[in-house]
Amino acid sequence: MTAGGARRQLSVGGSLRLWDVLLQDWLLRLRRRSPEIAIIAESHTPELLIRKLLDGVLDLAFMLEPAQLEILQIREVATLELVLVADRPGLGEEQALGEGYLMIDWGLAHALHHRRTFPDAPEPHTRLGNAHMALSYLHAIGGAAYLPLNMLRERLDARLLFRVDGAPVMRHSAHAVYLLRGPRLRLIDDVLGLFDSAA
């Protein structure tokens, strides 16, 4: 029996950083398009998401840096475009990466890319776990951070935040991960199509 008497059920997990910037909109599109599907949605660390997939607790998980295991299907579903923004206009890279810089945890690949791109930048005084924490901080205290362009457009248009001149865009792939021989492959393929339709 599925939740609420629904004919189909899907258990989905994602890292908190992706719920903030990508998965919330996808979940709303899924609910509006397919109200008959019972959805269980969770947020966990990537390690716990993989464990729950392997244990059959989750049907589908989303993360930036999935483990490469033979029994898992890994499918790129979106690209995060991270841009350097600040609470005031006219900042250059060196100023933005100075004392008020917020380092957001976008995963190990981002940390390594960041270090290679800005080898002389000082160690950040503030590190945050997700984009919404950083946005609240920027609006309350100020500073600069690398944030996803898709969640910044209105703030940039309203001049609440400002792009840092000349700062490179950093791109990271978001992936859907599921068992190669899981019981809901057709449903998973169907719901992942919502990422294509949103492009």
Image (spheres, rainbow, N blue to C red):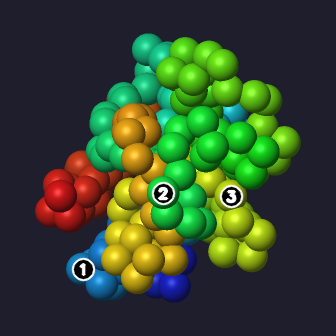
Question: Does 31 sit above or below residue 83?
Answer: below
Category of crowding for the residue at label 2, using alpha-carbon neighbours closer than 10 angstroms: few (below 14), some (14–19), many (at least 20): few
Q: Quadrant where the C terminus lies?
A: bottom left
Quick one: label 2 or label 3, which is nearer the N terminus? 2
Q: As rendered, which of 46 and 150 lies closer to the eye?
A: 150
144 left or right, relative to 113: right
27 left or right, relative to 160: left
Question: Does 21 sit above or below residue 183?
Answer: below
Question: Does 113 sit above or below residue 2?
Answer: above
Residue located at (66% from left, 74% from top): 139
Residue 33 badge = 1
Q: Secondary structure at mark 3?
A: loop
Closer mark to the observer between disc 2 and disc 1: 2
For badge 1, the amino acid type reads Arg
For badge 2, the amino acid type reads Gly
* Residue annotated with mark 2: 90
Q: Secondary structure at mark 1?
A: helix
Asked where in the image residue 72 lies, by quadrant, the reply is top left
- Distance in Å between CA atoms under marks 2 and 1: 43 Å
Asked where in the image residue 86 lies, by quadrant, the reply is bottom right
For badge 3, the amino acid type reads Gly
- Distance in Å between CA atoms under marks 2 and 3: 13 Å
Closer mark to the observer between disc 2 and disc 3: 2
Residue 143 badge = 3
Q: Secondary structure at mark 2?
A: loop
